[in-house]
Amino acid sequence: DKKPRHIFTESHKELVKAGEKWAKDTADAISLFTSSTAVLLFIGILTARYAENDFLKSLPLKLLFGLIALFFSVVSMMVAFCASLAMLLKGHEGIIITAMSFACIPVIVLLPSQLRLFIEIFKSMVLSN
């Protein structure tokens, strides 16, 4: 009596639950790792000895990696938020889509400001040689 899709859905309920848990845990772990990395890189900049040679390579390189880690931290935080929200609000697609649209705002705001700084630092490092 059952259609193949219904049989498939019934037989894979546990797999779906395990997949949801894995996605949520992985998104939280990536977010934690990237935010911790960004914080440690910026602390490394703050605690640098600020010697003349540090301004040529070491500090700009730390800043570039810090900016990259900060961007990925924000992106992974938004992905973790959206994944948790999608699991929590199953069946409310309108609310999920609206929340995910708003979750893109921090990434869209951060990208142009970081991209300009990233390009300027990269140019100064390459042209200084």
Image (cartoon, rainbow, N blue to C red):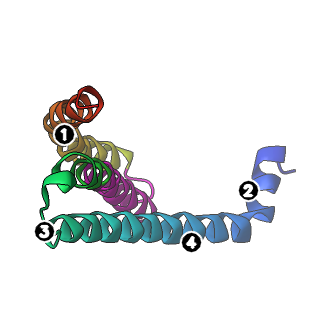
Q: Nearer the viewer, residue 99 or 22?
A: 22
Image depth: mark 2 or mark 4 in front: 4
Looking at numbered disc 1 in the image, what kind of residue is underneath it? Gln
Report the Cα–Cα distance between label 3 and label 1.
19 Å
Which residue matches tag 2?
9
Report the Cα–Cα distance between label 3 and label 4.
37 Å
Q: Nearer the viewer, residue 123 or 21?
A: 123
Q: Is residue 2 above or below residue 109?
A: below
Which residue matches tag 3?
46
Image depth: mark 2 or mark 3 in front: 3
Q: Is residue 31 above or below residue 106?
A: below
Q: What residue lies at 38% left-to-right and 54% top-to-bottom?
A: 79
Q: Position of residue 102 (x, y in %)?
A: 20, 45
Q: Which residues are magenta?
A: 66-92
Which residue matches tag 4?
21
Q: Decide which of tag 2 and tag 4 comes sooner along the chain.
A: 2
Q: What residue lies at 18% left-to-right and 46% top-to-bottom?
A: 106
Give yes or no for residue 73 being in the magenta stretch. Answer: yes
Looking at numbered disc 2 in the image, what kind of residue is underneath it? Thr
